[in-house]
Amino acid sequence: MKPGHDDSVRRPKDIKNILVIDDDVELCKLLEDYFTSEDFCFACAHSGDKGLDLLSGAHRDIIILDVMLPGRDGFEILREIRGVSSVPVIMLTAKGDHIDRVIGLEIGADDYICKPFSMRELSARVKAVLRRYVALSDAEPGKSPNAICLADLEMDLKSRAVKIGGKGVPLTNVEFRLLEAMLLCAGQDISLERLSIDALGRAYAPFDRSLSVHISKLRRKLGPYPCGSERIKTLRGEGFVYVFPEKGLSRANAL
């Protein structure tokens, strides 16, 4: 990659350039057909080094990176990407191993998805990561968008750790994504449809109780605010809102 190249300079109205780095030629063709039909500008590479060349030569809004690449694997490529760019990266893994997911997130992946996957789920993940990246790019000057802090709650987006009053709160991946989606819209209504896409990777089904079950478990784990008031308010039949104190939501590198 070219020294000093950094895709962290965003163009708010131009979040459509996607780069796929995967040696599966047939899969790349399917992804190209799907994402171009959704108005993405698509590029692909079948090796890590070629992917790095494409990244250094043009602006990319998001990268889909396979772990199992010939030669240098996806983890090594991700390390090199993170040395020069903060472009969002979604990792693909065929193994589904927990350790693969942990390593990828620790290195700097923004999300991961296991093969085989549905195109609709991958597309939902891509759009959710892009929305999150744009929202966090509005962080105050001089502050890192790596964490969200609200009253006694701290969420580290890189380590995927959540603390309340300084104590860790163990969350599942779905619970983490639900909380993240609500915190990024704290004080605002967030629809069931939006939460289902962001957290579950699928469209909301009116008779699907899984979203409500996950929210219920998340509520129990977080508990109320120290004053006793609820953190998550239900908008019956419409969605939820994460209630915040008058001082509001602050983003900082707090952890």
Image (tube, rainbow, N blue to C red):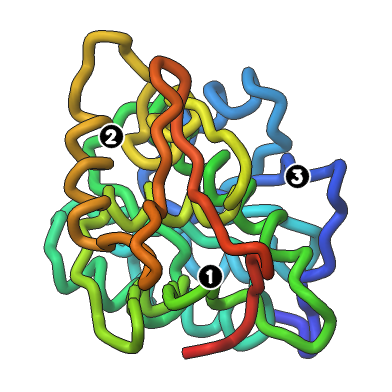
Q: CA distance from mark 3 to mark 1?
A: 28 Å
* Lower sequence index among marks 3 and 2: 3
Q: Which residue is mark 2?
A: 117
For the N terminus, the quadrant is bottom right
Evaluate if marks 3 and 1 touch, with contact meaning CB atoms under 8 Å apart. Answer: no
Q: Which mark is residue 15?
A: 3
Q: Secondary structure at mark 2?
A: loop
Task: Name the residue at 38% across, 47% down.
Answer: 178
Q: Which residue is mark 1?
A: 150
* Lower sequence index among marks 3 and 1: 3
Q: Sort mark 3 into few (<14), some (14-19) or many (20+) by Cα contacts within 10 Å.
A: some
Visible residue check, residue 76: no
Q: Position of residue 175 (x, y in %)?
A: 28, 52
- Would residue 190 be found to the left or right of residue 58 on screen? left
Q: CA distance from mark 3 to mark 2?
A: 23 Å
Q: Position of residue 59 (x, y in %)?
A: 79, 58
Q: Is residue 64 above or below residue 72?
A: above
Is label 3 or label 1 in front?
1
Amino acid under label 1? Answer: Leu
Q: Position of residue 42 (x, y in %)?
A: 66, 39
